[in-house]
Image (cartoon, helix red, strand yellow):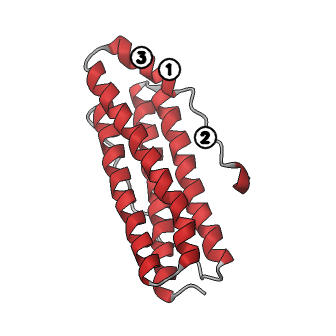
Amino acid sequence: MLSKTMEAALNEQINAEMYSSYLYLSMATWFEDQGLAGCASWMKQQAQEELFHAIKMFDFLAERGGRIILDAIAKPPHEWGSPLEVFEQVLAHEQKVTGLINDLVDLAIAEKDHATNIFLQWFVSEQVEEEDTATSLVRRLKLIGDDANGLFMLDTELGQRRFTPPAETQ
Ligand code: FEO
């Protein structure tokens, strides 16, 4: 049985994942506007991945008999100065989400809620991957600098990304 505190915390995390999805979709609109279709597509895939995170948490709450209450999603920013600035914000955002997940794990441990702790371990691993991807893209954009050709090549590469939900939830 989920405690009311854990139920509320997981509901908040559903909202945080929905905001992540909305933020990345907003970044996609900026890239579309800049003519960087590959980066825009990458962000749309990222938005889908975040929606998947929200639904994974939704399903777990439902399975544990928790009450799911959806809250308003905050308005994301819509202007950035450069592709590097966008990806630096992605990295900062993912670091923040890692902190939220770690707080949830701390709560599960404090409450001796082993089932929620085990469930959250998937998100702990996922955040390592998310931060690694964002860090790598920030580094590459720093190397590219003002090289339009390098940016075009990265844009083409990022356009290849396709998000596929893990098999057990399909
Ligand atoms: Fe749902 Fe990007 O963390």
In the rendered image, residue 135, in percent from the top left (x then y), is placed at 34, 38
Residue marked by disc 1: 156
Crowd rating for badge 2 (residues with CA inside 10 Å; few <14, some 14–19, many 20+): few
The disc, 1 or 2, on the residue closer to the chain's N-terminal end is 1
Q: Are marks 3 and 2 in contact (CB under 8 Å)?
A: no
Instruction: Report which residue position mark 3 lands on.
Output: 152
Determine the secondary structure under disc 2.
loop
Q: Nearer the viewer, residue 13 or 124?
A: 124
Q: Residue at x 52, y 87 (%)?
A: 3
Q: Secondary structure at mark 1?
A: helix
Discs 1, 3 touching: Cβ within 8 Å = yes
User: At which x and y percent is residue 134?
Assistant: 38, 39
Name the residue carrying label 2.
163
Report if residue 144 is visible in the image: yes
170 horizontally vs 68: left or right: right
Q: Amino acid at mark 1?
A: Thr
Name the residue located 38 percent from the left edge and 58 percent from the top edge.
Answer: 98
Residue 69 shows in this picture? no
